[in-house]
Image (spheres, coloured by chain):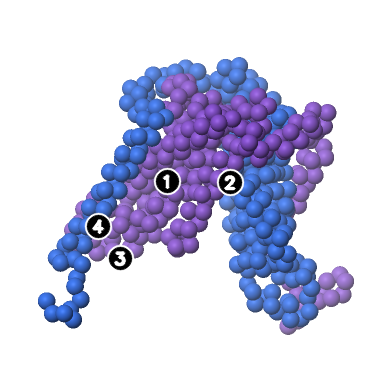
Chain colours: A blue, B purple
Amino acid sequence: MKFWQVKNKYEEPNSFFKEKRIRSYISLVLILIISYITARLIGFDLILIFKNFSKAVIRFLDLYIPPNFLDIKDLIEAMWVTIILCITAGTIGTFLAYAAALGMSKTTGKIKPLRIVLRALSTFLRNVPASIWAIVLLMAFWFGEFLALLVMTIGTFSFNARLFSDMIDETNKHSLEALDSVGANYWQIVFQGIVPETLPTSISWSLFSVETNIRSSTIIGMLAGGGIGHLIGIYRHFRKFDQLTAAVIFVVVGILAFDQLSVQIRKRIL
Amino acid sequence: MSDIKISFTGKPKIKTLTSADIVISAVIIVFILITVYTVFFNIEYKWDDFQDETALDIASNFIRFDKVGIDKIIEMLLSLINTLSLAFVTTITGFVTGIVFGLLSARNISNLYLSNLIRGTASLIRAVPTIIWVLIFVSGYGLSATTAVMGMFFHTLSFFIKSFAETFEEVDKGTIEALRASGSNWLQIVFGTILPSSLTKIISWIAIRSEINFGVAVVIGPAAGVPGTIGSLINNASRGGDYATQGFGVILVFLTAYIMEVTINNLRQKSIIN
């Protein structure tokens, strides 16, 4: 080999692929080992699942099927409360998130300390699951629809605030510049330039938040009270599993219906 | 330009109302009406039940780590590891099954009927909340980690089916056709082009699902009664009035989730996702 020739790391053409293959085998083995250790740590038993599967299915069918629609009046009322609570939390949370996003975004947030505080607040609220907020606030507020509303509003607010601030950052700068050059003040730029451009996407995200709220309403209702989740918690506590199935059917129908509704709305506005 | 409309104030109308505007205003009006109804007429505010002393206690003890006993700290950290393991095991089992069903439901390499069947089942699974899946399996497997994994597994599976199928469908059509033309069978197409070209996206989806699963694993304890996760400890501390320990647990959960979020954002900035 001459001195000016660059030495190839891979002498043979196939050694590159060989090295790659070895690396992927090693990572695969590592993942397997970690899974085995973690599974042992928490006491997860894969064999038990297959061994007891038929037993579990039979027990499930025995306990939960057929659904018992004895308290259908209560169920309908609870579902109605759940849906309006979720929509209310979605609306309030979205409004607050939009206001916070105006302060958080680099385009519109002119006060730096406020920007940092809002960003930190939304990051903190977002990264702690909503149900943990339910547990934390439960001792002060006690069970009830108001606590459920509060927890869902926190969830919607923290999730949407970051999305909206990213969205505002991505708005078309030229239209804002044009508004600025014709002498529009701050609020005129916000309401004539930023709001119209971001409105359809925000509506779409607020629909998504309501959907998420309906999904999480079961767990929040169990922990914080309010709506159909509270009923599910009660049924579980008193071991009325056939009525629990009826409540679950209500939740599933509610989620699927709202899903379809939001798909239809999204198709028309985006 | 004869079709300029004049508004009732006498100014020319610059913008005409489109159907999208009407839908948007309708949605906003309905949402605001429901909000007003709920806030002012529906909710029972039990202000008599509001414990202002407790609220003050919770707030003042939230970051008082000096009040947390060393045994509590060790217990919390151990249960945090437990929670992370729960999320990891669920993600791995969901991934292994999800990739098989994801391949079967990608429209470009699979049968249309099979794909629709799998997708329909997945969306039905997703409509049932995670906590309900856990409650269902409690009847069969008892209150153990196995139940928690089984309950969380179904949502993870349907998430992976949906996201993987979408990822696989974005794989370049020409490459698949070229492989097909040169006589490759299904497995060779999968391992030759589908998996290698969507590997980075798969990794990001796994990261995203790990974050979601961690959040679910935290709350699965207090809601379904599965022992050993950090949520149960926070719940116990809250019920026992030990607000310093509760605050410590919440901060731990926050830090873990925050690290995960930062990791995912880094992946996203390397243009791995989208």
Outermost residue toward the bottom in this view = B1
Closer to us: mark 3 or mark 1?
1
Disc 1 is placed on an element classified as helix
Question: Is A11 situated left or right of A235 in this image?
Answer: left
Kind of residue at badge 4: Lys
Label 2 vs 4, first from the N-terminus: 4
Dot 4, crowdedness within 10 Å: few (<14), some or many (≥20)?
A: few
Could you say which quadrant of the image residue B193 lies in? bottom left
Q: CA distance from mark 2 to mark 3?
A: 42 Å
Residue at position x 31%, y 44% in the image: A30
Quadrant position of the N terminus of chain A in the picture? bottom left
Q: Which residue is mark 4?
A: A20
Residue at position x 76%, y 44% in the image: B35
Q: CA distance from mark 1 to mark 2?
A: 22 Å
Q: Position of residue A14 (x, y in %)?
A: 16, 62
Residue at position x 75%, y 75% in the image: B14
Q: Which residue is mark 1?
A: B160
Instruction: Say whether marks 2 and 4 touch (CB < 8 Å).
Output: no
Could you say which quadrant of the image residue B161 lies in? top left
Disc 2 is placed on an element classified as helix
Q: Is residue B205 above or below residue A148?
A: below
